[in-house]
Image: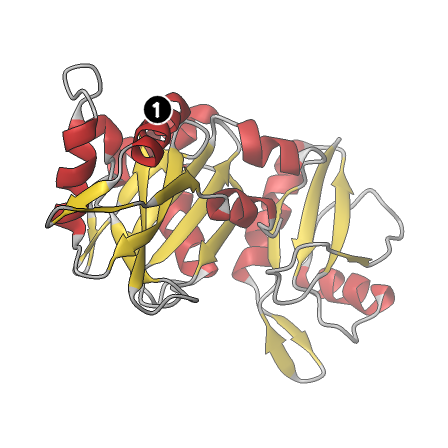
């Protein structure tokens, strides 16, 4: 049996009304005679209501996904875009560990989840996707995509990494193979070049190449509580490399004009939190 999750159900739409809409869409061979609308725990979902449809045949499930995603839902004379995807019971575990889970950095700020699905859908079946919008002084979005198969994620990385959407060059990586680091209390007169020079000066680059430390350019933003300090985030190639870099940064202050400035380094949990809140 194959199951499909249909999300973004309008708040005041009943299960019977949803069934009638699926009949109008001519969704074939739904196995469950009745279903209830459930509330998602996802904090980022625009509408946290969804239903799960069961199909005896995977082909019918795939056909249903295509029909639903290509057909706007008309309810109370208003058009609503609902989303369909393969239903995965252990999604949270997959988001943390699956080799089919990728992160897409440096997306245009206006990028939406639907845009992301359209762009990366050509590489395979998408189970879940979300776009994290810019915050503070950051001028680009970050996307997260979980594919049905590892080979599909690998293809997305091969084809999309360092490609451009307008003026924005994309950086695409496996999320579980990359570790994001955040630095706080960084002097406000520092830029990306100064950050790179400082970190490369304390790391043995013969053992850890610079390209393994910075898989994309460091991102600078203003600290929310300290107007004269900056935050910096960057992504290492592996968690082990990130851990070593964090240890070195915390042990080696920045020397500016004979004065030592202590910055703080730690794993940035924002990417994991965004993954956990992905809307199925």
Which residue lies at the image location 38% right of the left edge and 45% below the top edge? Answer: 120
Relative to 147, say whether 80 is above or below.
Answer: below
Q: Foreground: 211 or 34?
A: 211
Which residue lies at the image location 12% right of the left edge and 39% below the top edge? Answer: 197
Which residue lies at the image location 66% right of the left edge and 41% below the top edge? Answer: 61
The residue pinned by badge 1 equals 244
- For this orientation, the residue located farthest to the top is 207
Q: Position of residue 86 (x, y in %)?
A: 63, 40
As drawn, is 230 to the left or to the right of 194? right
Query: Which of the 4 image quadrants contains residue 127?
Result: top right
Q: Position of residue 185 (x, y in %)?
A: 34, 53
Please identify the quadrant where the N terminus is shown. Answer: top right
Q: Is residue 121 among the parts visible in the rendering?
A: yes
As drawn, is 171 to the left or to the right of 8? left
Which residue lies at the image location 60% right of the left edge and 52% below the top edge? Answer: 279
Q: Foreground: 116 or 60?
A: 116
Task: Report crowding for label 1: few under 14, some 14 to 19, many 20 or more residues within 10 A (C-alpha).
Answer: few
Q: Position of residue 10 (x, y in %)?
A: 71, 71
Number of numbered discs: 1
Q: Is residue 122 among the parts visible in the rendering?
A: no
Colour scheme of this structure image? secondary structure
Helix, strand or loop for disc 1: helix
Q: Foreground: 179 or 13?
A: 179
Q: Position of residue 261 (x, y in %)?
A: 26, 48
- For this orientation, the residue located farthest to the right is 34
- For this orientation, the residue located farthest to the bottom is 77
Relative to 121, say whether 90 is above or below.
Answer: above
Relative to 231, say whether 81 is above or below.
Answer: below
């Amino acid at each position: 049996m194959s199951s499909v999750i249909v999300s973004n159900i309008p708040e005041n739409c009943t299960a019977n009304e949803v069934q009638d809409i699926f009949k109008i869409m001519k969704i074939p061979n739904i196995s469950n005679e009745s279903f209830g609308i459930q509330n998602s725990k996802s904090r980022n979902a625009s509408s946290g209501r969804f239903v799960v449809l069961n199909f005896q045949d995977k082909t019918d499930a795939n056909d249903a996904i295509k029909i639903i995603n290509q057909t706007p839902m008309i309810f109370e004379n208003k058009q609503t875009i609902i989303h369909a995807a393969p239903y995965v019971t252990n999604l949270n575990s997959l988001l943390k560990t699956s080799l089919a889970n990728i992160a897409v950095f440096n997306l245009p700020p206006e990028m939406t989840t639907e845009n992301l699905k359209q762009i990366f859908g050509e590489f395979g079946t998408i189970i879940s996707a979300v776009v994290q919008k810019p915050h503070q002084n950051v001028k680009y979005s970050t996307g997260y995509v979980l594919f049905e198969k590892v080979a599909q994620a690998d293809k997305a990385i091969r084809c999309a990494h360092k490609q451009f959407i307008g003026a924005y060059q994309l950086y695409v990586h496996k999320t579980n193979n990359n570790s994001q680091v955040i630095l706080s209390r960084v002097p406000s007169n520092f830029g990306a070049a100064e950050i790179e020079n400082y970190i490369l000066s304390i790391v043995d680059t013969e053992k850890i190449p610079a390209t393994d430390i910075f898989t994309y350019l460091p991102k600078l933003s203003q600290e929310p509580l300290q107007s004269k300090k900056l935050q910096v985030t960057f992504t290492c190639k592996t968690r082990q490399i990130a851990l070593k870099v964090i240890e070195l940064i915390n042990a080696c202050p920045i020397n500016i004009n004979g004065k030592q400035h202590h910055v703080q380094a730690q794993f940035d949990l924002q990417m994991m939190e965004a993954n956990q809140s992905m809307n199925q």
